[in-house]
Image (cartoon, rainbow, N blue to C red):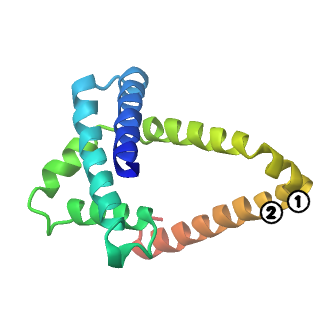
């Protein structure tokens, strides 16, 4: 039953994303639903792959990423159409339900969050700062290497 529940949640979140994409970014609701249907199918295929006996060792996100990478790469016959369809979805429309879920997950574990107390602040600052600095460094080196800057 967990598989059907996951598919239901993916479809429900896709509908919420389509509404956000249409209202916030003025993209036609039909185009949004088509693009999100493609993303849901990719997610379902990756999720089902992660349930196969030899592949359970790796997280679901890995398999969804692999399916998405293969589906959008030139080895897939319809990659141009797939990329053109999914290009209709704004990243922020996708992030909104994900961040809402993250907020609910943190609220659920509020007692655990209280136990961590102030120690989470320096750790978070170090992680965010390190991520930003190294991302900027990699971008600087790459853009300089490509001759863009």
Residue 35, given in percent of the width and then of the height, sits at 25, 39
- Residue 28 seen in render: no
Counting from the top left corner in percent of width and height, residue 96 is at: 52, 36
Q: Which residue lies furthest to the left in this view?
A: 77
Q: Residue 23 carries which label?
A: none
* Proximity of marks 1 and 2: CB atoms separated by less than 8 Å: yes
Q: Residues within 10 Å of mark 1 (few under 14, many from 20)?
A: few
Residue 78 in sight: yes
Q: How far is the residue under mark 1 from the one under mark 2?
A: 7 Å
Residue at 23% across, 30% down: 31
Residue 10 location, x and y as percent? 38, 42
Q: Farthest residue in the right direction?
A: 118
Q: What element carries label 2?
A: helix
Query: Is 34 left or right of 60, judged from the image as shown?
Result: left
At a point 30% along the width and 47% down the height, the residue shown is: 39
Instruction: Determine whether, in the image, residue 36 is placed left or right of residue 110.
Output: left
Which of the 4 quarters of the picture holds residue 50? bottom left
Residue in the image at 34% along x and 45% along y: 4
Q: Residues within 10 Å of mark 2 (few under 14, many from 20)?
A: few
Q: Looking at the picture, tell me which residue is in the foreground, 45 or 139.
A: 45
Q: Is mark 1 on a helix, strand or loop?
A: helix
Q: Which mark is residue 123?
A: 2
Most foreground residue, 63 or 88: 63
Residue 119: give its label.
1
């Amino acid at each position: 039953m967990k598989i059907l529940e996951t598919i239901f949640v993916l479809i429900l979140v896709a509908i919420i994303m389509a509404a956000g994409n249409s209202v916030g970014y003025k993209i036609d609701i039909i185009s949004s639903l088509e693009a999100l249907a493609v993303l849901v199918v990719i997610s379902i295929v990756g999720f089902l792959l992660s349930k196969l006996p030899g592949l359970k060792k790796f997280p679901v996100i890995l398999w969804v990423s692999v399916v998405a990478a293969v589906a959008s790469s030139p080895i897939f016959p319809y990659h141009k159409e797939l990329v053109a369809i999914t290009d209709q979805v704004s990243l922020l429309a996708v992030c909104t339900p994900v961040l809402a879920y993250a907020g609910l997950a943190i609220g659920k574990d509020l007692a655990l969050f209280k136990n961590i107390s102030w120690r989470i602040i320096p750790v978070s600052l170090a992680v965010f700062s390190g991520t930003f600095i190294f991302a900027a460094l990699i971008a600087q080196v790459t853009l300089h290497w490509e001759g863009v800057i």
